[in-house]
Image (cartoon, rainbow, N blue to C red):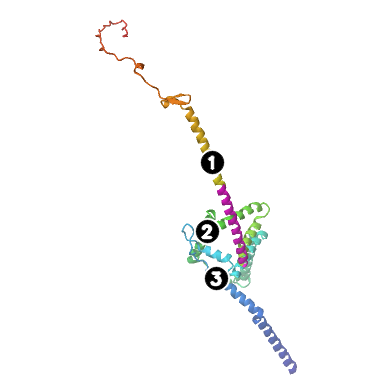
Amino acid sequence: MADDYSNGSTDLDALKNNAASAYDAVTKGPVAQNVADQSAKTVDELSNLSASRRTPSTPAATGQPLTHYHSFFSELLSWNNPRASAIAYLSIVAAIFSVRYLDMLRLGFKLTWMVLGVTVTAEVAGKTILNQGLATQLRPRKYYTVSKETLDSAIGDVHELVNFFVIEAQRILFAENVYVSGLVAIAAFFAYYLVKIVPYWGLALIATTLAFLGPLVYKTNKEFIDAQLHRASEIIGAQTAQLKTVAQQNTEKATQLTKQYVGEYTAKAQTLVSKATPASLHGEEHTNGHANKSELRDADFPPAPQADIKTEPVVPVTVKSGEQQPLLI
């Protein structure tokens, strides 16, 4: 009997030791250590991403300071914190699929009536059986409230977020960065045609994927992409220079032809004007194509009077009433 008891206790101790060893192997093994390390790195990257929300030192083209969300989204999409960026991307994708395939409104109503049903049932059952409701036992001593500082901080963040989108829309519209405005224009062009065949949630998924994975692809293949962009810019520059040379040559030829035609038409116009001008305007007589001045002689003028001019007295005429006044000739 004693031997059986001692054997049982020994087996129990061995079982406990095995369980402790298995627990240590699970919690302190390489897998657990790796999980702990990755968790710590994830927390650090999330903290770095949260700390990146500061106003950039470079203002906008108008001199206005940018919002701290400019730094935040720039850090998020640059994949400097890959775990935080991956979590953000997967969270957005999961939200898109949830809105697409889950009826969130009905799910919210369902969750509400189930939770309230449990609490009401527990309260009624507790008061009936134990004379004290179970929900009352779980009720906190003081209801949770939102402090004014927290609310002001949240409103400030919302204000900064709204201004981020407003400022970025204006920067894109007025082409502060030509490349960004060009990319947005191309994206809008394709979206205009894709919206006919792709649902809105599909467009949102495509836009999110491009926004997150585009910078990641560029970052991982930066040297190759930069080399190709540099080569393309050289080709475009050479073609532009050639077009400028051809355009300049054509412009010079057109200018010379224009000057030639203008000179010819000017000469013809002067010839026509000189032929159409009357000789009296120049004080000349044209005979057989030669202009001769007219010779004036004394015989061409009448003789001047020698005697004085005699004047006769004017006799006044009396006109009676009713008679017609004679005309003086």
Whichever of labels 1 and 2 marks the residue nearer the N terminus, that label is 2
Q: CA distance from mark 3 to mark 2?
A: 23 Å
Task: Tell me if residue 173 comes above or below residue 274 in the rendering.
Answer: below
Q: Label 2: which residue? A: 162
Secondary structure type for disc 2: helix
Number of marks drawn? 3
Q: What amino acid is labelled 1 in the image?
A: Thr
Secondary structure type for disc 1: helix
Residue drawn at x 48%, y 33% as measured from the top left: 270
Res 220 seen here = yes
Whichever of labels 1 and 3 marks the residue nearer the N terminus, that label is 3
- Mark 1 or mark 2, whichever is nearer to me: 1
Bounds of the magenta segment: 220-249
Label the magenta part by its dominant secondary structure. helix
Whichever of labels 3 and 2 marks the residue nearer the N terminus, that label is 3
Residue 237 magenta: yes
- Please provide percent x and percent y for residue 134: 60, 71
Secondary structure type for disc 3: helix
Which numbered circle lies on residue 258?
1
